[in-house]
């Protein structure tokens, strides 16, 4: 493998992992780098032209500048938008880290940086004894954590960081996504996270009803992210 990579984790599902991953792809591409996206596991898809397509995967594909076959970029795609271990069981499939690693190696060989997006939160089950945390562990990737700023984010963020530390994962930094425009005491919550997470805050994404990856990229410290991954 020739390229570098980074794993985008979230404090929960629906906190902006795809948005941040796409913004990071666009920002790194603007620096002249060959960038590709990958979402090893996706749940929630529509059937088109003989294959299952996930919306997050499509967004990553559009944001990247290295063309990757959909089945390589997303080896496990399930129709129902449910927990991935349940979707896999219903489909009669077992998610294999060896398969994910093999597909990642194909992408990395053609790219300078691969942005790998997780599924759900860090510990969402992928199988009987497998969680999403196994992906950055197996691929040996640093993690950028997306914290969805809403009620409960302090507990979710700190538990996720603690889970990473317990597994020996490297947290490169975190990004705050202001997903709730009505959140009370947002700045105080940010301060609390700054005080408790040793790794750097790499960007604050302001709330937008229809966020655009290119605009979000400007809110991220792309140069620093490129340096720490």
Image: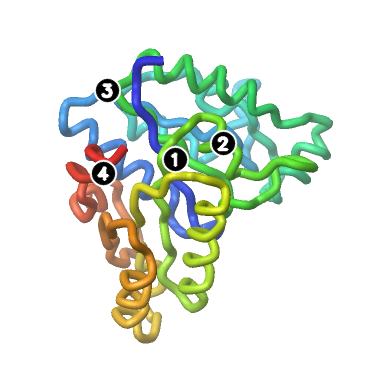
Residue at the bottom extreme, as displayed: 184
Q: Is residue 87 visible?
A: no
Residue 143, how many percent across, how many down?
42, 45
- What kind of element bears circle 4? helix
Between discs 3 and 1, the one toward the N terminus? 1
- What kind of element bears circle 3? loop
Residue 57, how many percent across, how many down?
49, 35
Q: Mark 3 touching mark 1, by CB under 8 A?
A: no
Which residue lies under the disc numbered 2? 135
Which color scheme is applied?
A: rainbow
Residue at image position (51%, 29%) is: 139
Which residue lies under the disc numbered 4? 225
- Disc 2 to disc 4, how far (Cα)? 20 Å
- What kind of element bears circle 1? strand
- Disc 4 to disc 1, how far (Cα)? 12 Å
Describe residue 223's horizontal placement relative to residue 164 as left or right: left
Which residue lies under the disc numbered 1? 7
- Disc 2 to disc 3, how far (Cα)? 22 Å
Nearer the observer, 94 or 158: 158
Which residue lies under the disc numbered 3? 34
Nearer the observer, 229 or 16: 229
Residue 185, how many percent across, how many down?
35, 85
Residue 70, how many percent across, how many down?
52, 23
Question: Dot 1: within a 10 Å radius of its alpha carbon, few (fewer than 14), some, or many (20 or more) residues?
Answer: many
Q: Mark 1 touching mark 2, by CB under 8 A?
A: yes
Quarter residue 75 falls in? top right
Q: Quadrant of the C terminus?
A: top left
Between discs 1 and 2, the one toward the N terminus? 1
Residue at image position (49%, 54%) is: 10
Q: 78 above or below 152? A: above
């Amino acid at each position: 493998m020739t390229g570098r990579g980074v794993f985008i984790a979230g404090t929960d599902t629906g906190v902006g992992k795809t948005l941040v991953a796409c913004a990071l792809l666009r920002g790194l591409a603007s620096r002249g780098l060959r960038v590709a996206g990958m979402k090893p596991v996706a749940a929630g898809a529509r059937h088109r032209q003989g294959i299952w397509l996930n919306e997050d995967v499509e967004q990553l594909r559009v944001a990247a500048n290295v063309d990757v076959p959909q089945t390589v970029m997303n080896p496990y795609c399930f129709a129902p938008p449910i927990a991935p271990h349940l979707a896999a069981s219903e489909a009669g499939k077992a998610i294999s880290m060896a398969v994910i690693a093999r597909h990642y190696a194909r992408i990395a060989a053609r790219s300078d940086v691969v942005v790998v997006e997780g599924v759900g939160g860090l510990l969402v089950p992928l199988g009987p004894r497998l969680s999403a945390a196994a992906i950055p562990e197996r691929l040996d990737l640093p993690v950028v954590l997306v914290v969805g700023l809403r009620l409960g984010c302090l507990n979710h963020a700190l538990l996720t960081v603690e889970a990473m530390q317990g597994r020996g994962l490297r947290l490169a930094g975190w990004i705050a996504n202001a997903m709730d425009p009505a959140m009370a005491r947002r700045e105080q919550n940010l301060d609390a996270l700054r005080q408790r997470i040793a790794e750097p805050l790499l960007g604050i994404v302001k709330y937008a009803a229809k966020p655009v990856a290119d605009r979000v990229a400007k809110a991220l410290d792309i140069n620093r992210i490129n340096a720490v991954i």
